[in-house]
Image: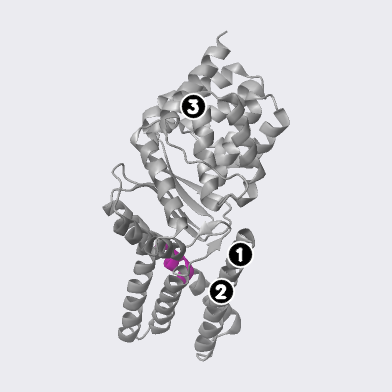
Amino acid sequence: MEKKSKVKNGKIFKRLKLLFYMIIVLFYALLIIGGGTNAIKLILLIFLQIIVICILIINIHEFGHLIIGKLFGYKLLSYRIGFFSWSKENGKMKFLIIKNRGYSGLCGMIPPEKELPNYKLVLFYASGILFNVISGTFFLILSLINGSLSQFFSFLGISSILIGVLNLLPIMTSNNPSDGKVIWSMLLKKPFAEKLLVMKRLLTKLSAGIRPNHLDIPNLNLDNLTSFDLYIIIYAYFQALDKNYDDKIFLYANLLEENIDNFPTPTLPVVYYELCYVGCITNDIDRAKKYYKHGGNILKKDKDINGCRVKAYYEFYVNHNPDTALELCYKGLAVLDKFPIKGQAFMEKDLIHSLIRLINL
Protein backbone atom coordinates (compact mmCIF):
# COMPACT_ATOMS: atom_id res chain seq x y z
CA MET A 1 0.00 0.00 0.00
CA GLU A 2 2.83 2.39 0.87
CA LYS A 3 4.52 1.80 -2.49
CA LYS A 4 1.27 2.34 -4.41
CA SER A 5 0.65 5.54 -2.49
CA LYS A 6 4.12 6.87 -3.34
CA VAL A 7 3.69 6.05 -7.01
CA LYS A 8 0.29 7.75 -7.03
CA ASN A 9 1.66 10.85 -5.28
CA GLY A 10 4.59 10.99 -7.70
CA LYS A 11 2.25 10.87 -10.70
CA ILE A 12 0.08 13.61 -9.20
CA PHE A 13 3.14 15.82 -8.65
CA LYS A 14 4.35 15.30 -12.22
CA ARG A 15 0.88 16.14 -13.55
CA LEU A 16 0.76 19.29 -11.43
CA LYS A 17 4.11 20.39 -12.84
CA LEU A 18 2.99 19.62 -16.40
CA LEU A 19 -0.27 21.53 -15.84
CA PHE A 20 1.70 24.42 -14.38
CA TYR A 21 3.96 24.67 -17.45
CA MET A 22 0.95 24.41 -19.78
CA ILE A 23 -0.74 27.29 -17.97
CA ILE A 24 2.44 29.37 -18.36
CA VAL A 25 2.50 28.64 -22.10
CA LEU A 26 -1.18 29.55 -22.59
CA PHE A 27 -1.13 32.71 -20.49
CA TYR A 28 2.12 33.88 -21.98
CA ALA A 29 0.91 33.20 -25.52
CA LEU A 30 -2.31 35.13 -24.92
CA LEU A 31 -0.42 38.14 -23.61
CA ILE A 32 2.14 38.28 -26.40
CA ILE A 33 -0.35 37.53 -29.21
CA GLY A 34 -1.97 40.82 -28.33
CA GLY A 35 1.11 42.52 -29.80
CA GLY A 36 0.24 41.33 -33.33
CA THR A 37 3.69 39.96 -34.20
CA ASN A 38 4.35 37.30 -36.85
CA ALA A 39 2.93 33.90 -35.75
CA ILE A 40 6.11 31.84 -36.27
CA LYS A 41 8.31 34.40 -34.56
CA LEU A 42 5.74 34.60 -31.79
CA ILE A 43 5.79 30.85 -31.15
CA LEU A 44 9.60 30.76 -31.16
CA LEU A 45 9.71 33.72 -28.80
CA ILE A 46 7.24 32.09 -26.40
CA PHE A 47 9.13 28.81 -26.22
CA LEU A 48 12.49 30.54 -25.94
CA GLN A 49 11.33 32.67 -23.05
CA ILE A 50 9.64 29.68 -21.34
CA ILE A 51 12.90 27.71 -21.57
CA VAL A 52 14.78 30.68 -20.10
CA ILE A 53 12.20 30.99 -17.31
CA CYS A 54 12.38 27.27 -16.47
CA ILE A 55 16.19 27.28 -16.37
CA LEU A 56 16.22 30.39 -14.20
CA ILE A 57 13.62 29.00 -11.76
CA ILE A 58 15.42 25.67 -11.33
CA ASN A 59 18.77 27.43 -10.94
CA ILE A 60 17.36 29.79 -8.32
CA HIS A 61 15.98 26.81 -6.37
CA GLU A 62 19.20 24.76 -6.47
CA PHE A 63 21.32 27.86 -5.87
CA GLY A 64 19.37 28.40 -2.66
CA HIS A 65 20.40 24.94 -1.42
CA LEU A 66 23.99 25.64 -2.51
CA ILE A 67 24.30 28.98 -0.69
CA ILE A 68 22.74 27.82 2.59
CA GLY A 69 24.59 24.51 2.38
CA LYS A 70 27.92 26.32 2.01
CA LEU A 71 27.06 28.55 4.98
CA PHE A 72 26.43 25.44 7.09
CA GLY A 73 29.63 23.69 6.01
CA TYR A 74 28.28 21.33 3.33
CA LYS A 75 30.58 20.33 0.45
CA LEU A 76 29.29 20.38 -3.14
CA LEU A 77 29.42 17.07 -5.01
CA SER A 78 27.05 17.58 -7.93
CA TYR A 79 24.94 20.36 -9.44
CA ARG A 80 22.41 19.40 -12.11
CA ILE A 81 19.88 21.29 -14.18
CA GLY A 82 17.86 18.99 -16.44
CA PHE A 83 20.31 17.04 -18.61
CA PHE A 84 23.28 19.21 -17.65
CA SER A 85 25.46 18.04 -14.78
CA TRP A 86 28.51 19.48 -13.03
CA SER A 87 30.15 16.95 -10.68
CA LYS A 88 33.27 17.26 -8.55
CA GLU A 89 35.97 14.80 -9.59
CA ASN A 90 39.40 14.84 -7.95
CA GLY A 91 38.79 18.33 -6.61
CA LYS A 92 37.66 19.77 -9.97
CA MET A 93 34.21 20.30 -11.47
CA LYS A 94 33.46 18.14 -14.52
CA PHE A 95 30.64 18.80 -16.99
CA LEU A 96 28.45 15.95 -18.31
CA ILE A 97 25.18 15.57 -20.19
CA ILE A 98 23.17 12.82 -18.49
CA LYS A 99 19.65 11.41 -18.47
CA ASN A 100 17.61 12.35 -15.41
CA ARG A 101 14.55 10.61 -14.03
CA GLY A 102 12.21 12.02 -11.42
CA TYR A 103 13.73 15.48 -10.94
CA SER A 104 14.55 18.59 -12.93
CA GLY A 105 17.38 19.89 -10.76
CA LEU A 106 19.76 18.66 -8.08
CA CYS A 107 22.28 20.11 -5.68
CA GLY A 108 24.09 17.11 -4.19
CA MET A 109 26.10 18.03 -1.09
CA ILE A 110 27.98 16.17 1.65
CA PRO A 111 26.97 17.23 5.18
CA PRO A 112 29.65 18.72 7.46
CA GLU A 113 31.63 16.47 9.79
CA LYS A 114 29.99 18.09 12.82
CA GLU A 115 26.34 17.08 13.17
CA LEU A 116 23.94 19.97 12.57
CA PRO A 117 20.97 20.84 14.78
CA ASN A 118 17.57 20.00 13.30
CA TYR A 119 16.58 23.62 12.62
CA LYS A 120 19.60 24.03 10.32
CA LEU A 121 18.69 20.84 8.47
CA VAL A 122 15.14 22.15 7.99
CA LEU A 123 16.51 25.49 6.76
CA PHE A 124 18.84 23.69 4.33
CA TYR A 125 15.94 21.75 2.78
CA ALA A 126 13.71 24.85 2.79
CA SER A 127 16.34 27.11 1.23
CA GLY A 128 15.39 26.32 -2.38
CA ILE A 129 11.74 27.14 -1.67
CA LEU A 130 12.68 30.35 0.16
CA PHE A 131 14.90 31.49 -2.72
CA ASN A 132 12.07 30.80 -5.18
CA VAL A 133 9.55 32.82 -3.17
CA ILE A 134 11.91 35.72 -2.39
CA SER A 135 13.22 35.99 -5.97
CA GLY A 136 9.68 35.60 -7.34
CA THR A 137 8.52 38.53 -5.23
CA PHE A 138 11.50 40.58 -6.43
CA PHE A 139 10.71 39.81 -10.10
CA LEU A 140 7.07 40.83 -9.61
CA ILE A 141 8.19 44.16 -8.18
CA LEU A 142 10.64 44.52 -11.09
CA SER A 143 7.79 43.91 -13.56
CA LEU A 144 6.03 47.00 -12.19
CA ILE A 145 9.15 49.11 -12.71
CA ASN A 146 10.46 47.86 -16.07
CA GLY A 147 7.80 48.46 -18.72
CA SER A 148 9.59 46.83 -21.69
CA LEU A 149 10.17 43.52 -19.87
CA SER A 150 7.18 43.62 -17.56
CA GLN A 151 5.51 40.53 -19.07
CA PHE A 152 8.70 38.47 -18.81
CA PHE A 153 9.40 39.49 -15.21
CA SER A 154 5.79 39.02 -14.15
CA PHE A 155 5.69 35.45 -15.44
CA LEU A 156 9.14 34.73 -14.07
CA GLY A 157 8.00 35.97 -10.66
CA ILE A 158 4.69 34.06 -10.66
CA SER A 159 6.38 30.90 -11.91
CA SER A 160 9.13 31.05 -9.30
CA ILE A 161 6.63 31.43 -6.45
CA LEU A 162 4.41 28.61 -7.76
CA ILE A 163 7.39 26.24 -8.14
CA GLY A 164 8.33 27.05 -4.54
CA VAL A 165 4.79 26.19 -3.41
CA LEU A 166 4.80 22.94 -5.43
CA ASN A 167 8.07 21.89 -3.81
CA LEU A 168 6.50 22.43 -0.41
CA LEU A 169 4.06 19.57 -1.05
CA PRO A 170 5.04 16.45 0.99
CA ILE A 171 5.28 13.89 -1.82
CA MET A 172 7.66 11.47 -3.53
CA THR A 173 8.53 11.43 -7.25
CA SER A 174 10.39 8.36 -8.54
CA ASN A 175 11.49 7.69 -4.95
CA ASN A 176 12.93 11.20 -4.66
CA PRO A 177 11.40 13.01 -1.66
CA SER A 178 10.33 16.57 -2.35
CA ASP A 179 11.77 19.29 -0.12
CA GLY A 180 8.32 19.55 1.45
CA LYS A 181 8.31 15.83 2.26
CA VAL A 182 11.54 16.24 4.24
CA ILE A 183 10.56 19.55 5.85
CA TRP A 184 7.12 18.45 7.10
CA SER A 185 8.48 15.09 8.27
CA MET A 186 11.13 16.82 10.35
CA LEU A 187 8.78 19.45 11.77
CA LEU A 188 6.16 16.82 12.67
CA LYS A 189 8.84 14.33 13.82
CA LYS A 190 7.62 11.53 11.58
CA PRO A 191 9.47 8.19 11.07
CA PHE A 192 10.51 9.37 7.60
CA ALA A 193 12.59 12.13 9.22
CA GLU A 194 14.21 9.68 11.65
CA LYS A 195 15.36 7.51 8.76
CA LEU A 196 16.66 10.57 6.93
CA LEU A 197 18.71 11.57 9.98
CA VAL A 198 20.15 8.04 10.27
CA MET A 199 21.20 8.17 6.63
CA LYS A 200 22.74 11.64 7.06
CA ARG A 201 24.69 10.49 10.14
CA LEU A 202 26.14 7.54 8.23
CA LEU A 203 27.21 9.80 5.35
CA THR A 204 28.66 12.34 7.82
CA LYS A 205 30.75 9.64 9.52
CA LEU A 206 31.99 8.28 6.19
CA SER A 207 32.90 11.81 5.05
CA ALA A 208 34.77 12.40 8.33
CA GLY A 209 37.02 9.39 7.67
CA ILE A 210 35.28 6.55 9.52
CA ARG A 211 35.58 3.37 7.47
CA PRO A 212 32.44 1.45 6.44
CA ASN A 213 33.44 -1.47 8.69
CA HIS A 214 33.11 0.81 11.74
CA LEU A 215 29.67 2.19 10.88
CA ASP A 216 26.72 1.34 13.09
CA ILE A 217 24.29 0.08 10.42
CA PRO A 218 20.65 -0.19 11.59
CA ASN A 219 18.75 -3.43 11.09
CA LEU A 220 16.75 -3.70 7.89
CA ASN A 221 13.25 -5.05 7.47
CA LEU A 222 13.83 -6.77 4.13
CA ASP A 223 10.11 -7.50 3.72
CA ASN A 224 9.13 -3.81 3.77
CA LEU A 225 11.90 -1.67 2.29
CA THR A 226 11.35 2.08 2.16
CA SER A 227 13.22 4.61 0.02
CA PHE A 228 15.74 5.35 2.75
CA ASP A 229 16.25 1.63 3.43
CA LEU A 230 17.67 1.46 -0.09
CA TYR A 231 20.42 3.86 0.95
CA ILE A 232 21.05 1.79 4.08
CA ILE A 233 21.51 -1.30 1.85
CA ILE A 234 24.32 0.56 0.05
CA TYR A 235 26.04 1.34 3.37
CA ALA A 236 25.54 -2.26 4.54
CA TYR A 237 27.02 -3.49 1.26
CA PHE A 238 30.08 -1.22 1.71
CA GLN A 239 30.49 -2.51 5.26
CA ALA A 240 30.41 -6.13 4.07
CA LEU A 241 32.90 -5.21 1.34
CA ASP A 242 35.20 -3.54 3.86
CA LYS A 243 35.01 -6.53 6.22
CA ASN A 244 35.41 -8.99 3.32
CA TYR A 245 32.21 -10.85 4.28
CA ASP A 246 31.51 -12.61 0.98
CA ASP A 247 28.08 -13.95 1.90
CA LYS A 248 26.82 -10.52 2.91
CA ILE A 249 28.42 -8.87 -0.12
CA PHE A 250 26.43 -11.14 -2.40
CA LEU A 251 23.26 -10.80 -0.27
CA TYR A 252 23.31 -6.99 -0.43
CA ALA A 253 24.36 -6.95 -4.09
CA ASN A 254 21.34 -9.10 -4.92
CA LEU A 255 19.12 -6.72 -2.94
CA LEU A 256 20.54 -3.79 -4.88
CA GLU A 257 19.75 -5.53 -8.14
CA GLU A 258 16.24 -6.62 -7.07
CA ASN A 259 15.35 -3.05 -6.09
CA ILE A 260 17.24 -1.23 -8.83
CA ASP A 261 14.06 0.31 -10.30
CA ASN A 262 13.23 1.90 -6.93
CA PHE A 263 16.50 3.78 -6.46
CA PRO A 264 16.47 7.56 -6.97
CA THR A 265 18.24 8.52 -10.19
CA PRO A 266 21.25 10.25 -8.55
CA THR A 267 22.08 6.99 -6.72
CA LEU A 268 21.95 4.69 -9.74
CA PRO A 269 25.61 5.14 -10.82
CA VAL A 270 26.72 3.83 -7.40
CA VAL A 271 24.47 0.79 -7.83
CA TYR A 272 25.71 0.17 -11.38
CA TYR A 273 29.36 0.43 -10.28
CA GLU A 274 28.96 -2.09 -7.47
CA LEU A 275 26.91 -4.60 -9.45
CA CYS A 276 29.56 -4.47 -12.18
CA TYR A 277 32.26 -5.01 -9.54
CA VAL A 278 30.43 -7.96 -7.96
CA GLY A 279 29.94 -9.45 -11.42
CA CYS A 280 33.71 -9.25 -11.89
CA ILE A 281 34.75 -10.90 -8.60
CA THR A 282 32.17 -13.68 -9.02
CA ASN A 283 33.14 -14.28 -12.66
CA ASP A 284 29.57 -13.47 -13.65
CA ILE A 285 30.74 -11.87 -16.89
CA ASP A 286 27.25 -11.18 -18.22
CA ARG A 287 26.36 -9.28 -15.06
CA ALA A 288 29.61 -7.32 -15.15
CA LYS A 289 29.10 -6.36 -18.81
CA LYS A 290 25.46 -5.45 -18.24
CA TYR A 291 26.18 -2.95 -15.47
CA TYR A 292 29.37 -1.64 -17.04
CA LYS A 293 27.16 -0.72 -20.00
CA HIS A 294 24.57 0.85 -17.66
CA GLY A 295 27.35 2.89 -16.08
CA GLY A 296 27.94 4.35 -19.54
CA ASN A 297 29.94 7.53 -20.00
CA ILE A 298 29.75 8.34 -16.29
CA LEU A 299 31.83 5.25 -15.48
CA LYS A 300 34.08 5.45 -18.54
CA LYS A 301 35.00 9.08 -17.77
CA ASP A 302 35.18 8.63 -13.99
CA LYS A 303 38.72 9.36 -12.75
CA ASP A 304 37.91 9.15 -9.02
CA ILE A 305 39.33 6.25 -7.05
CA ASN A 306 36.02 4.34 -6.98
CA GLY A 307 35.59 4.60 -10.75
CA CYS A 308 39.21 3.51 -11.30
CA ARG A 309 38.68 0.54 -8.96
CA VAL A 310 35.62 -0.72 -10.82
CA LYS A 311 37.24 -0.25 -14.24
CA ALA A 312 40.45 -1.96 -13.07
CA TYR A 313 38.55 -5.05 -11.91
CA TYR A 314 36.59 -5.02 -15.17
CA GLU A 315 39.77 -4.92 -17.25
CA PHE A 316 41.31 -7.76 -15.26
CA TYR A 317 38.33 -10.13 -14.99
CA VAL A 318 36.33 -9.35 -18.14
CA ASN A 319 38.80 -7.99 -20.71
CA HIS A 320 41.72 -10.10 -19.33
CA ASN A 321 43.99 -7.08 -19.61
CA PRO A 322 46.21 -6.97 -16.48
CA ASP A 323 48.42 -4.15 -17.78
CA THR A 324 45.46 -1.77 -18.24
CA ALA A 325 44.04 -2.94 -14.91
CA LEU A 326 47.33 -2.15 -13.16
CA GLU A 327 47.48 1.27 -14.80
CA LEU A 328 43.96 2.06 -13.56
CA CYS A 329 44.90 0.87 -10.06
CA TYR A 330 47.79 3.33 -9.85
CA LYS A 331 45.67 6.13 -11.32
CA GLY A 332 43.11 5.50 -8.59
CA LEU A 333 45.72 5.51 -5.81
CA ALA A 334 47.18 8.77 -7.17
CA VAL A 335 43.89 10.59 -6.52
CA LEU A 336 43.08 8.86 -3.21
CA ASP A 337 43.42 12.04 -1.13
CA LYS A 338 41.00 13.96 -3.38
CA PHE A 339 38.05 11.61 -2.88
CA PRO A 340 35.45 13.56 -0.82
CA ILE A 341 34.15 10.59 1.21
CA LYS A 342 37.29 9.79 3.21
CA GLY A 343 36.04 6.64 4.95
CA GLN A 344 35.10 5.06 1.64
CA ALA A 345 38.47 6.12 0.19
CA PHE A 346 40.28 3.92 2.75
CA MET A 347 38.17 0.94 1.64
CA GLU A 348 38.80 1.73 -2.04
CA LYS A 349 42.55 1.82 -1.35
CA ASP A 350 42.49 -1.69 0.17
CA LEU A 351 40.38 -3.10 -2.68
CA ILE A 352 42.83 -1.70 -5.24
CA HIS A 353 45.84 -3.09 -3.34
CA SER A 354 44.13 -6.50 -3.30
CA LEU A 355 43.85 -6.41 -7.09
CA ILE A 356 47.47 -5.26 -7.47
CA ARG A 357 48.64 -8.24 -5.40
CA LEU A 358 46.49 -10.56 -7.53
CA ILE A 359 47.92 -9.13 -10.77
CA ASN A 360 51.50 -9.47 -9.51
CA LEU A 361 51.14 -13.13 -8.51
User: What residue is disc 3 on?
Assistant: 242
Relative placement, left or right, of 97 versus 135 is right
Extreme residue in the top direction: 361
* Quarter residue 300 falls in: top right
Q: Nearer the viewer, mark 1 or mark 3?
A: 1
Q: Which residues are magenta?
A: 52-59
Q: Nearer the viewer, mark 2 or mark 1?
A: 1
Give the Cα separation between the discs numbered 3 and 2: 44 Å
Q: Measured along the vertical axis of the image, is residue 306 above or below residue 233?
A: above
Quadrant assignment for the N terminus: bottom right
Residue 286 placement (x, y as % from top left): 73, 32
- The amino acid type found where label 2 is placed reads Leu
- The amino acid type found where label 3 is placed reads Asp
Closer to the N terminus: mark 2 or mark 1? 1
Task: Determine whether the residue tagged by mark 1 lies in a helix, strand or loop.
Answer: helix
Residue 93 placement (x, y as % from top left): 41, 44
Identify the residue at image location x=44%, y=32%.
212
Q: Is residue 57 magenta?
A: yes
Res. 97 visible in picture = no
Residue 137 placement (x, y as % from top left): 33, 78
* Quarter residue 41 falls in: bottom right
Closer to the N terminus: mark 1 or mark 3? 1
In the image, which disc is placed on residue 5? 1
Q: Main secondary structure of the magenta part?
A: helix
- The amino acid type found where label 1 is placed reads Ser
In the image, which disc is placed on residue 16? 2
Residue 345 placement (x, y as % from top left): 42, 30
Res. 211 visible in picture = yes
